[in-house]
Amino acid sequence: DDHLVMASPQLQVITGPNTGGKTVVLKVAGLSALMAYTGIPIPAAASSRIPVFDRILADIGDEQSLEQNLSTFSAHMTVTADILRLASSRSLVLLDELGAGTDPLEGAALAEAILERLYKRGAFTLVSTHLGSLKEFAFQHRKCENACMEFDPEKASPTYRLLSGLPGRSSALVIARRIGVPTDVVDRAEEIGGASDASEAVIEGMERAKRQLEQKRNEMEKQRKQAHQLREDAAQELQTMQTLRQAIDHEAERAEESRVHAAIAAIEAALKELGEPPRERRPAYDRLRETLATARRQTTLAERRHATAQALRKGEAVFVPKLGTVSEVKKINKGKQLITVEVNGIPMEVPFGEISWILPPPGYQREWYE
């Protein structure tokens, strides 16, 4: 699994078919804890978290011994006794096939009592089992969780995926049939045990619901990614439209300024060509020059620039077309209608009428005044 199974519940009961990978899960958890303790990167997602344990206590495998008069069950209980003595709230306990090797009823009762002791002690515990009572134990305790090794009923084989939140079925009859146990024997076993165990049907229904929920979750995740992509595309399109609008406004302002200045400059050039007027016409010429100056100051473009300058604040960015640069506003003198900007480290005073109400679009390199 992407996240270490020990990261969420305090105690996890892992069930499922034989050869499904339960023991491997316990070994991976223990090895990952040891690797993390020694600073070795572990095979888990970047968001995974794992505690630093004071002890890693494991009963995995068969330690039976003729020399020491230890049966499989006795060997397991010898190790388990040491685990119960040493385990603390900072320990990781790994128990494989807890309660196996003896009378099923007594083994189940003993296994449940062992889990109760570890649960009360607060030890992080992973246990694999085929006992139904331990599945119920995990359901009944708040910090416990069932988990199972997934089994593909269509292929009649395990998938080796750990599914949290659901108990698993041993699928013993399916496996027996797959490995060659006579069909009539397996059919008879199904007759004997199939009708008496309603919990298997409940587990099957839960597994089916789990698969349906997972499918819906995957579909929702796919839709979420599609919606995220649509939002990114819309944001990019909006940015493109804003840049285009900015470029259009920029060129419109430049065109208006060029048109107004060109018209006034043409009239002034014509007056200059006429030379000094006769004495009696000088008042008329003076009024014409004043009209041109007023026109230069009172165009729509000039009014808009003055309004923009009045609203500026120190520290804001402003575009000065005449300088062909975007500069930071250092000082504003509304009385003299002057803005002090800094260009290449040099402060410069610019009249209100020579600033733009828009910033140039990205990539702008054209000069306003040629």
Image (cartoon, rainbow, N blue to C red):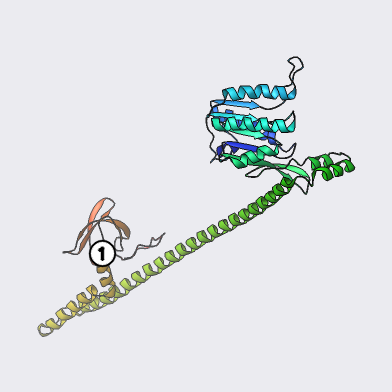
User: Which residue ends up furthest to the bottom in the rendered image?
Assistant: 280
User: Which residue ends up furthest to the top in the rendered image?
Assistant: 67
Side of 165 relative to 180 (left or right): left
Residue 35 is situated, as x and y percent measured from the top left of the image, at 58, 29
Total count of labels: 1
Residue 358 is situated, as x and y percent measured from the top left of the image, at 34, 65
Identified at 14% across, 79% down, the residue is 286
Q: In terms of image quadrants, where is residue 123?
A: top right
Residue 77 is situated, as x and y percent measured from the top left of the image, at 68, 24
* In this view, 70 is above or below 136: above
Side of 298 relative to 5 (left or right): left
Is residue 294 visible to us here?
yes
Amino acid at dot 1:
Ala
* In this view, 302 is above or below 24: below
Identified at 56% across, 57% down, the residue is 224
Identified at 21% across, 78% down, the residue is 271
Q: Which residue is mark 1?
A: 311
User: Relative to the observer, which residue lies in front, 100 or 43?
Assistant: 100
- Quarter of the picture holding the C terminus: bottom left
